[in-house]
Image: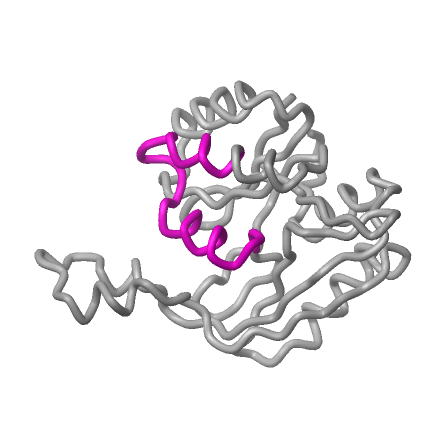
């Protein structure tokens, strides 16, 4: 990997560059605030009101930004992130539009296992077993993010989410539920006051 540590911005730009069939990319900005899981930490018994709150997304108002593939680069992503208000984060959506107008998905996943050498080794092995080919695992601060290079059809994407859901203790089940409801995955590219760690590459999988 060398001395240079790749950031999530560089990883996403590389994936988009490596898939010339992509025509349109969706970015998203959203309000940074504590998640439902953050609020539930240390709570012995979750009440109905909290469970009902858990059915909704954790993030606040979202703004979608659609950009042509030619407009996406490390520099442009860095500018988007730098120009955000202090309480907002930049993310990327998994669903992209390819030549011909069809939608496909970049494989993306959010994990909840704590960063450690043993967890990273097991996670890399499990992700590799999915058979998606080349991909990246990034440390996100409290856990890990995953990006794959091979675009997935809707059916393949749903299967991928289901397989990740079976990674007990590693994949974020709430994240998977919300992404299925939304119809696409979102992963954070920038840092903020609460999530002050910019996701960065820690392992490659194949």
Q: Residue at x 81, y 57 (%)?
A: 24
Query: Image height check: is 158 above or below 33?
Result: above
Q: Residue furthest left?
A: 44
Q: Quadrant of residue 113?
A: top left
Task: Please give the range of residues in magenta.
Answer: 160-186
Instruction: Provide residue 90's location: percent of width, then percent of height.
Output: 62, 65
148 left or right, relative to 72: left
Looking at this view, is 56 or 72 the one in front? 56
In this orientation, which residue lies closer to the viewer: 150 or 39?
Answer: 150
Image quarter of the C terminus: top right
Residue 138 vs 24, above or below: the answer is above
Q: Is residue 172 left or right of residue 12?
A: left
Determine the residue located farthest toward the bottom in the rendered image.
85
**Magenta stretch: includes residue 181:** yes
Query: At which x and y percent is residue 37?
Result: 30, 58
Q: Residue at x 72, y 70 (%)?
A: 65
Q: What residue do we see at 40% from left, 39% from top?
A: 171
Whether residue 9 is situated above or below residue 79 in the rendered picture:
above
Reply above or below: 8 against 191. Answer: above
**Does 93 appear in magenta?**
no
Q: Residue 172: where, in percent of width, then height?
A: 39, 45
Quick check: 88 left or right of 71? left
Q: Quadrant of the N terminus?
A: top right
- Quarter-of-image position of residue 70: bottom right
Taking the spot 56% from the left edge, 79% from the top edge, the residue there is 86
Q: How many marks?
A: 0
Q: How is the image coloured?
A: one colour
């Amino acid at each position: 990997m060398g001395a240079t540590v790749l950031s999530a911005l560089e990883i996403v730009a590389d994936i988009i560059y490596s898939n010339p069939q992509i025509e349109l990319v969706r970015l998203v900005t959203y309000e940074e605030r504590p998640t439902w899981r953050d609020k539930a930490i240390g709570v012995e018994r979750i009440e109905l009101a909290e469970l009902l709150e858990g059915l909704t997304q954790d993030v606040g108002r979202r703004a979608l930004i659609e950009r042509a593939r030619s407009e996406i680069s490390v520099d442009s992503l860095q500018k988007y992130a730098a120009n955000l208000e202090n309480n907002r984060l930049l993310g990327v959506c998994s669903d992209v539009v390819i030549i011909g107008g069809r939608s496909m998905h970049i494989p993306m996943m959010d994990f909840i296992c704590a960063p450690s050498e043993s967890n990273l080794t097991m996670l890399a092995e499990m992700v590799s077993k999915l058979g998606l080919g080349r991909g990246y695992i990034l440390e996100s601060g409290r856990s890990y993010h995953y990006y794959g290079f091979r675009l997935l059809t809707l059916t393949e994407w749903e299967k991928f989410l289901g397989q990740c859901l079976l990674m007990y203790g590693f994949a974020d089940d709430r994240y998977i539920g919300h992404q299925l409801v939304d119809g696409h995955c979102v992963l954070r590219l920038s840092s903020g006051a609460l999530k002050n760690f910019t996701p960065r590459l820690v392992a490659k999988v194949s």
